[in-house]
Each structure stands twice: as C-alpha cells, then as structure tokens.
Image: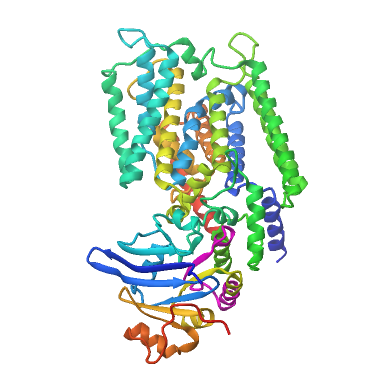
Amino acid sequence: MQMQSVSKERASLVGSLGVDGRVLTMLVVLAVVWTAFQILTLGQPGQFLSPQNLWNLSVQTAVVGIMVGGMVLVIVARQIDLSVGSILGFTGMIMALIQTVPPLGWGGHWLLALGAGLLLGALIGAFQGYWVAYWGVPAFVVTLAGLLIFRNATFIVASGRTIGPLDDNFKVLGGGLNGSIGEFWTWVVGLVVIAYIVYQAFSNRSRRLKNGLPVRPVWAEGVVNGFLILLTLAFVWVMNAFPYPGTNIPRGMPVPVLITLIVLFSLNWIALNTRFGRYVFAIGGNPEAALLAGINVRRMLVVVFALMGFLAALAGAVQAARLNFVTNSMGNLLELDVIAAAVIGGTALAGGSGTIVGAALGALLMSSLHSGMVLMGLPTEWQNVVLGLVLLAAVIWNSVYLRSRR
Amino acid sequence: MTPLVEMQNICLRFGGNQALDNVSVNLYPGEVVGLLGHNGAGKSTLIKVLSGAYQADSGQIRVDGREVQIRSPQDAQALGIETIYQNLALADNLDAVANVFLGRERVRGIRLDEDFMELEARKTLDRLRVKIPSLRVPVAQMSGGQRQTVAIGRALYFKARCLIMDEPTAALGPEETAKVGELIKALKAEGVGIFLISHDLHDVFDLADRITVMKNGRVVGTVYTQDVSHDDVLGMIIGGVMPKGVRPAQTPLPRG
C-alpha cells in the first residue's frame, strides 16, 4: 500500500517533467552503457569517456544520425524504406564521379556534385513514394526493389571502380583534418543553442500563462532546461578538448556532427510544429481519419519518401567525404542500422508513434555500443549479437510502454 | 420555409448492386430526422454521398434551395455539412486539440498556433459539458463518451449547420448516451439540422422529429415520430410498407 502510493507519486513527478517516457528511458540506458564502458575500459589508454573517443563517437554517429529522423517520419506514416543504404551509395558515387578529375571522373565543381547528389536523392525518394502513394504498392517491396536497383547501379555507373580522391573542399563535410569548425565557432554554436533554450523556455511559459493554459511547475522547467544547458556545455567542452595531433589547438565540433545536429533539430521542429508533421502522425494514427479530414495523404507520403531520399544523399555526401574514396559497397546494409536506431529510439513499426529525439538517442546508443565493444576488443560477430539483443529488448520495452498507455 | 438540405432522386450503383435507388430525403433547420433501416438498407451510403465520401450517379443535392456539387469531404464542410462517423474518424495517437482541428489547423506563418487551438478546443468542448480532464493526452486514452465529445466538438467548432451522426451512441454507456441526447437537443435549439442514423429505436423516438425508413436502397417512407408506434416503424423496416392511415411527412412538423 505504502509502496504503491510512493511509486505513484514518483510517476507523477516524472510525468510533470513533460518529457516523453521513451526519451527518458533512452537517456537512462545511455548513461548506464557509458558508465559501464568507462569502467570496463579504465585500464586502457583509450578510455571510453575520453574526449578523443567521444569526439570520434560523434563522427561515427553522424551518418546514421542524419538519416534516422527521416526514417522516424517514414515509419510513423506506416511505411518503411529499405533502400536508404543503396541511395546513400549511389548518390555518393554520383557525387564522387562528378567532382573527380578525368578520366576517372567528370571533373565538375564540388558544389555541383553536392547539389546534384542531393537533388538526385530527393528524386529517387519521390519516385519510390509515388508508387507507394498513388499505386498502393507496399513500401517494403518498392524500397526492396530500390535497394537492389541502386546498389547495383552504383557498380554500373563506376564500372566497378573505386572513385576518388575527392575535392578538398568537399572533404570538409566528412570531418577529416580540416573538417572541424574550431574552438571559437563551437562555442558560438553552443551559446546560440543555450540562448535558444532559455528564450524558448521563457517565451513559451509566459505566453501560455497569458492565455490561461496549464504550464509545467517551475522546478520542472528548471530541471529540464537546466539539463539541456548542462548537456550543451558538456558537449562543447568535449568537442574542444580533443586537439589536432601534435598540437594543443582544439578541433572543435566536426562538420558532419554540425550537419547532423542541424538536420535533427529541423526535423524535430517540423514534426512537432508544422502541419506537415501533424499530418504524418495523423496518417500513421488513422489513415482513414486523415483522408476524411481532407489531408492529401498521397502527396504527404511522396514528400516523406522524398525527404528520406534527400537525407540519404546528404548522409552519402558525408560518408563519401569522410572516406575520400567511394567504393561500390559504400552504405551496404546501412538501412538496417538506420531502422534499428529508429526502433531502439522508440519508433513503433505499427506507425503513429515515435520521436526524433528518441531515435537520435537510439543512433547514439548503437554507435556507443559499437565503439565500446571495439575498445574492449570484442570480435565483430559478438558485437552484432549484442546489437541484435539490444534491438530485441528495445522492441519489447517499446510495446510494453505503448500498452501501458492504452 | 426552404429545407436546409434536400437530396432528390439520388441513385448510386456499386457494380451490379443498386445501393441507392431514387432516394429523396430532406432536412429543415432545427430538426432531427432519424434514418432507419437494416444493415445494407443504404443509409450509410446515402450519408456518405451527402458528406462527400461517395458521389451519386444521378440526382440533385440542394443546400438552402441552391443546387450544389459535393465532390469531396471539403466541399461538404464548406457548405456547413459535418459528419460524425461511426468509427469516430479520430487519430487515436493525437490529442484532443489536434483532433478537433485535424486538417484545418490554425497556423502563424508555418508554425501551428497551439495556444489558440487549445483555447478554442477547450471552449468548444466545455460547451458540450462532458468532462475531459486533459486535452493534451492521446484520445486513445479517453473513454467512449469523451471521444464522442471530441468528434462532436470538431463538427461544432467549424459551425456545422447540418450534422450527420452515424450511430452516435453505439459505443456509449447509458449515462453517456443520455449526455449525447442532451447535446442533440441543445444543437437543435441552435438551429442545427441533424441526420441521426441509429439502430436504436428508443434513441430515435426520443430525439427525432421525423423518421425516414430505408430498405434495399429505397425510401419506404417518411413519417412524423408522434404519428407512429415502434411497431409501425418496425413494419416499415422489416416489411417495407407504410403503416395504414399515416400521413407522409415531407415538411417539418408544424409547431403547436
């Protein structure tokens, strides 16, 4: 009896934070995993929580992180996209071909390569979305076909060769030696984010109060926003604590990480604050209701797939820039990582439910597990077994969570 | 008085099945017309024609005496015709505010004006006097009555002049059914015309001014509720014949 009332009170305390339960779970799991890896790697030169490892971790998360928000929208709308790894490879190869010097490539400007690659990705996505939306072909089949077509088209356009090296300016996207924004700009980004957090908190609260709408308790505002600010400061500190080799000049935030954060922030804002985001969730919750409410469900689906294709191409640019040479297997099986990250982050495959933030944390958890197990010297096959188990556990937890909310 | 809505000689064929055969019904402001009939009698098909989900092969629809074309749910909504579907047509994963405004969100620039919508939804739902503690939880977590209130609130907010209610009490307990009954009376008093589709004869006798019975895609007849007994209406539903000596009811009951 006593126990029950205490746990109820605790539940309502957590509830008044106004944070999605699945996001909270992900944060707790991440904290546990990071602590565990730190303890397990204490005796080694490269500890898990060293700035160097965390900096590398952030770069390793970028490619999946760029795509995972798009995948959340796809899955929320009751669809799936199995072709993102192949689109990433194909558009990456096209971008490499355009900018690489003849005779291997076509000798174009790197900006042209980037623009053409992104446009191509969006068009491929829209093309797949068209068959799903207007012809009712299941997305699983359409994008499975896309996986086969574009994986092998990558081989065909390059005649099986590896294409590179890429333009030095383009390579900035990959976060290599010149691919970080430096200490000063990292602080600028961090302070802008903090200013935004503070501004949002105050303006939202005062507006809701003025309109007589319920608000979170002050302590909850403080806890949530204080946590976000501390997180931002810690992030800036870590990014600036890893110097260029042989110097003590901090690298600052890698460009691919900046791109990832911008993409995730934008998608999260769109999902929560625009008609488009609202309609994607409505379609996932009840497609018939969405149709009867006058939502153009078909067009929305095409846009969702086009957005996914665009993001796959953006991730392709980052991946290509990071590797400097594009092979025809680049991005192979990456679709599985993206879908797994979305699902681990609380996206329900049945549609209608998921958060961008949760999925971003899912992507971070996956690359953390990967990085930690590599540090511990665990063989690849065991790494994949662990990732599989984590995926399974996440899906089970997710369905328990959703059932408890019915 | 001009009818609010007049459907005349509506025909609709699905393949070999004549779903609607020369169906004519009308509805005046401030009255409730009950639509009765077996499953497959054509009542749901008829209201789907009016709400823009289906289009008739032939026949006319007039609103305020003017002939109109209703090609989509939006056309119907623009004419003030709102439908509350049997399955409620709510997105279960969204909250009450999002559902009330679904498809007609208020925006500032490109940003949803959540505060405005929450305030307006609260006002509208308060008018319906069904207690909904939080408008910000997914409607999947609400009771049947609360969900029905959200669905009605949706129609009400957008100034429905003609409300089509398809089995509004089917999923509700007795207390909530009574609430919906009160709600219908309140809407009537505001001059809203209501097509009420129901299996429940008691509901219809309680609420409807006139009753139109359909069978096999045709109208058996329209009668004043006060002129007939349950048995008369059952005879119309099952036998497809007008009761003897009962006057047809093409206009609303004269007051007094």
Where is residue B76? Give x, y as percent.
46, 58
Where is residue B99? Give x, y as percent.
55, 55
Where is residue A44? Give x, y as percent.
58, 24
Q: Nearer the viewer, residue A196 or B45?
A: B45
B159 inside magenta stretch: yes
Q: Nearer the viewer, residue B117 or B19?
A: B19
Where A317 falls versus B90 (above or below)? Answer: above
Q: Nearer the viewer, residue A184 or A30?
A: A184
Where A254 falls versus B238 (above or below)? Answer: above
Q: Residue at x 64, y 27 (%)?
A: A235
Q: Is residue B89 left or right of residue A98?
A: right
Q: Residue at x 35, y 31 (%)?
A: A124
Look at the image and tell me in which quarter the C terminus of chain B lies.
bottom right
Furthest residue in direction left, as rendered: B16
Which of the 4 image quadrants contains residue A292?
Answer: bottom left
Residues drawn in magenta: B155-184
Is there any visible trace of residue A12 in the rendered image? yes
Q: How is the image coloured?
A: rainbow
B9 inside magenta stretch: no
Is there any visible trace of residue A405 in the rendered image? no
Furthest residue in direction front, as rendered: B1
Q: Nearer the viewer, residue B1 or A379?
A: B1
Where is residue A400? Give x, y as percent.
52, 55
Furthest residue in direction bottom, as rendered: B245
Which of the 4 image quadrants contains residue B86?
Answer: bottom left
Where A289 falls versus A51 (above or below)? Answer: below
Q: Is residue B41 left or right of residue A27?
A: left
